[in-house]
Amino acid sequence: MKNHLQIRLILLLLFAQFFISCENNDEPMVSDENSNEYVNDWMYQQMKRYYLWNDVIKNEGSLALNPKDYFKTLLKSEDIYSYALHPELSETAPKSLRSKFGFDMSFVEFEGKYYGVILYVLEDSPAKNNGLQRGQFITHIDGKELKLDNYNALYSSLVSQNQINITTVTYSVQEGFSNSKEVSILQGFTFSQPIHYKIIEEKNTKIGYVEIPHFDVGQAQTYQQIFQELKNKAITELVLDLRYNGGGDISSAAALSIILASNIKSSDLFVKFEGNANGGKVDQSFLEALKSNESTVTFEALRNVHPSINKVYILCGNRTASASELIINNLKPYLEVITIGEKTFGKDVAGFPIEDDRIASKRGWILYPAIYKLFNSRHEGNYSKGIEPVIYKVEFNGPEIFLLGNPSEVLLEKALNQITGNTNKKIVKSLQTLPVSVLHGDVDPLLQFKP
């Protein structure tokens, strides 16, 4: 009887082991490729591997969420840079006035009234083609007069619409405010922007002024042509206007830095990338950063157009971000950088796109997570709260706002006075700037980096 019982127990154990073995050999459950679970599990795996702050991701959470909402659950609470988009779902792309209508704006109070002020207008944009220009004031949005308690909500409504209706006025010291004008603007595309430059002569000093709206891929050749001309005209001072440059391609930023930096070699360290335990640390020389996305212009060709300067004046503000901040921070070991304006935006991270290409015939989600912190060759960085200017100056302290490049424009005038030693001060009517809660939408989400 005892032996019979032992045989039965052994058979039961063998049967249980066989059953467990069969279970373990089954194929794992795979989500339907059209489901949120299929996408979100992929997002989770990529973020756990690449995300700079992957230690905040404790578990997968609810994979049934909409992918855009799910992605946000994986982010560090302070992270406003990382984003995810689907190329066939326009509603997932970052939105801003600049990308939708082609202009930037802010808000001011003047003599008890509240206005939106047009700061920057892109060439050949819906805004430009409908008559908007820097310095105009907005009094009404969708028929509603701007007030202290509604301007932020009205601004948010502009960003979310496909057509905007505004009322504008202009101001000059001689004539005051003009009659109002109704303007209606449809959302549209704006393509690559020109780089504006000129030479200003002040007290027998030739000063180059260069305004760069964005760091696009392949700008090195344009920089080479511009700075060859400035060098031929024998400039000895340079003002670089980056106040509305929200970032872009790192190789174009490196190309400009190669031209500006003094006495550098191709092997000199330009940028240090520091990621999580998986990403590690990556150092890039000037040459390596240039070649990451530039194959037509050489390091030597860019060095040959270096003008006779030993410092650079950079005009900056709260829309100066990403690659623009990288230039400010990473030129400092090689060149005196004198920033004029207000504190920059504070984007000291970089990343590269991660695309879901598991289905060959179908376009998938693309992640743009923060992957690396940025440092210069002296390991200086950590400017997530912005870079303080060397010379603090509010961009508009009076109601007459001049076009960029005009020597009377506030920040450029300050730079020219700094160069020439002019200490004369103008007396202007007081203009108070107001905070804007969604300003980060007007700068690039992430500095693009190729590993």
Image (tube, helix red, strand yellow):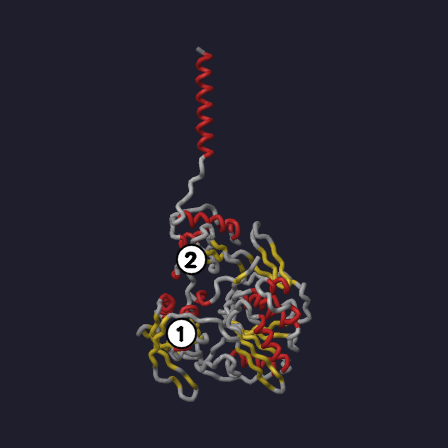
| Residue 216 visible in the picture | yes
Q: Which mark is residue 86?
A: 2
The residue to which callout 1 is attached is: 126
| Residue 119 visible in the picture | no
x, y (%) of residue 124? 44, 76
Q: Which mark is residue 85?
A: none
Residue at the spot x=39%, y=61% of the render? 90
| Quadrant in the picture for residue 169 | bottom left
Callout count: 2
For mark 2, give the secondary structure.
loop
Seen in the picture, residue 204 relative to 436 is either above or below; the reply is: below
Residue at the spot x=43%, y=79% of the render? 133
x, y (%) of residue 445? 48, 62
Seen in the picture, residue 83 relative to 97 is either above or below; the reply is: above
At label 2, which amino acid type do we have? His
Tell me which label, 2 or 1, sits earlier in the chain: 2
Which residue occupies the foreground of this view, 343 or 365?
365
Q: Is residue 149 left or right of residue 255?
A: left
Which residue occupies the foreground of this view, 61 or 427?
61
Specify the quadrant that holds the C terminus: bottom right
Q: Is residue 304 left or right of residue 10?
A: right
Q: CA–CA distance between discs 2 and 1?
A: 25 Å
